[in-house]
Image (spheres, rainbow, N blue to C red):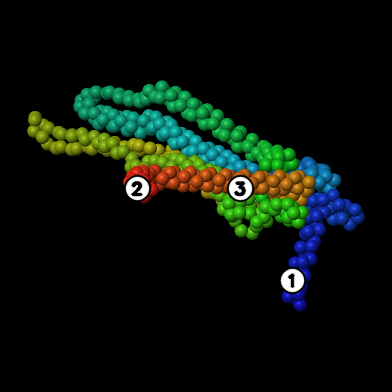
Amino acid sequence: MMKTTCPQLKQTLYHSWSAAADLYTTNTRHCWRNRLVLLIICLTFSLVLSSILLLYLLYVLQYGLMVAAGIAGSCWVVVGASLFLSKRVRCFGVLFVLSCGMRQGRNILITAGTSLVVLKNIQNTLENITGLSRSMVCNLQAKRVSINTTPLCNYVRMLRWVGNVLRAFTDFGVAELVSDLEVTSRGDSEKLRERLVEAERTLNGTAKSIWAAVDTLSSVGQRLFPAFSFLLLMGFTVLHLRRYCHNKKYENVYITRTFINFDEKQKAEGRRPVLPLTPKEARRYITIPSPGLSATEGKAMLKFSFPVFTHCLAWVLFIGVDVLMFWFVEVIRTRLHELEPFHVPLIMNINEEMTVIGVPISEEIDSRDFSYQVSIFEKSCLPKPRLVIYDSILPLVVLLAALLSMALLSAKLTQIRLMVCEQFFSTNAEERVEFLHAKILKKRSRKEGNRIAEESSLRSLIKKISGVQYSTDHRRMTPFSKQARLSAATGRSERRPFLKKCEL
């Protein structure tokens, strides 16, 4: 039961698809059933386009749900009615969808990938460079503060301690010498502070201007690029239709079923046919639909893929520059983090020696450590680089997968587009077939004329060569003929007296 059902199902689906395609490509709407089927097809096709428009309005332009739904619903009704009423609009819709997977769609995807890679990686590189510069300014400011605190405070403490120790030596019991030691510290770092503030202000202004330009380009491109791409694809589709209808030489290198039927008709009428093609013509003219790939289609696929390869190299270059800058800042951060603080030893020793009439009685050594450490780079000012390759890798993988699929289907999509144009514009297709048929016959007659001329020139050349050889042989025989004539003349002269004697 299953074996008999599957072929019947396939045949039913094939007939249904053929009937729907015939309704879509022709204007035959005689009964209400055909009109209803065509209306359903047009509304379904329009619903898909309106859904894409709704997503664009909601998530890219960030419109409200009601506004976006109203615009998308109006577009659905208008496009569906236009498809139902006009055959040219239906053809334009199918060709527009096919153009999304061909060279125009490839260029748009390459542009989108380039803008994504360039903007994101340039912005991240600038952020890493700005972060490194800010960390340097932050470290200088921290050093300016630490100079006024740690070293000077230690020196002040040391001097005060020395003063307290010396005060003990001014007490003589009978009389006491009172002395006051006041120590204050002041670091003249006002100029350094002003320069650091000015450097930070300049750095922030430059970074803000660059980021504002990059953000503006990114937001404008994100919002307007889909609309611009849509208009560009529409323009290319209209241009293709115009060339197909008015230029018989445009992409007229395909042997279609219309061409085969026309050639059979010419053969039945007793005129000169074209098929089968010669091997050289078969390499130039492609028979469609064909399941396999010909050499011409393979070259077309390579030609289609070459810009993708070159732009991939450019993407890798920009990503590599960003990764190198990230690695450079990360290495600097690691080395600065590993630096040990600089130790400044500052130890004071005071020897207290008591003597009586020059004889030492006791000796004491009072020692105090005022050493301090100075960090070469503050840990709080270390740069923190960022890498965006993980954020942009998923969109790039999706773009490359789409471009690879388009490269594999580019040759077949060209054939499908030509067959769609033949279905919608049968009159133009017949004119193009007649032109191609006459062009092939003209080339063949020209080749035959050249071959006949070559054969005639070859025959004349052979005759000339044989004539020159005959004259050469004749010249070689002339000395022997002269000698023979001389001998013949001598024999006649010797015979004459004998004849006279006989007559006597």
Residue 458 image position (x, y, % from top left):
52, 46
Disc with the residue nearer the chain's start (2 vs 3)? 3
Instruction: Name the kind of residue labelled 1 in the image.
Output: Cys
Instruction: Name the kind of residue labelled 2 in the image.
Output: Lys
Residue 501 circle label:
2
Query: Looking at this view, is 79 or 53 the one in front?
Result: 79
Task: Give above or below for 47 relative to 126.
Answer: below
Query: Looking at this view, is 493 or 31 the one in front?
Result: 493
Which marked residue is nearer to the observer: mark 2 or mark 1? Answer: 2
Is residue 57 visible in the rendered image? The answer is no
Disc with the residue nearer the chain's start (1 vs 3)? 1
Drawn side of residue 409 relative to residue 312, left or right: right
Residue at image coords 27%, 23% = 178
User: Does the CB distance between marks 1 and 3 fall below 8 Å?
Assistant: no
Residue at image coords 33%, 25% = 183
Residue at image coords 76%, 56% = 268
Task: Give above or below for 413 relative to 181.
Answer: below
Query: Looking at this view, is 439 or 445 the one in front?
Result: 445
Q: Residue furthest front?
A: 504
Residue 433 image position (x, y, % from top left):
72, 48
Mark 2 element type: helix
Drawn side of residue 29 relative to residue 214, left or right: right
Residue tagged 3: 448
Q: Badge 3, how many Cα within 10 Å: few under 14, some, many 20+?
A: few
The quarter of the image holding the N terminus is bottom right
Residue tagged 1: 6
Disc with the residue nearer the chain's start (2 vs 1)? 1
Mark 3 element type: helix
Task: Give above or below for 17 relative to 112.
Answer: below
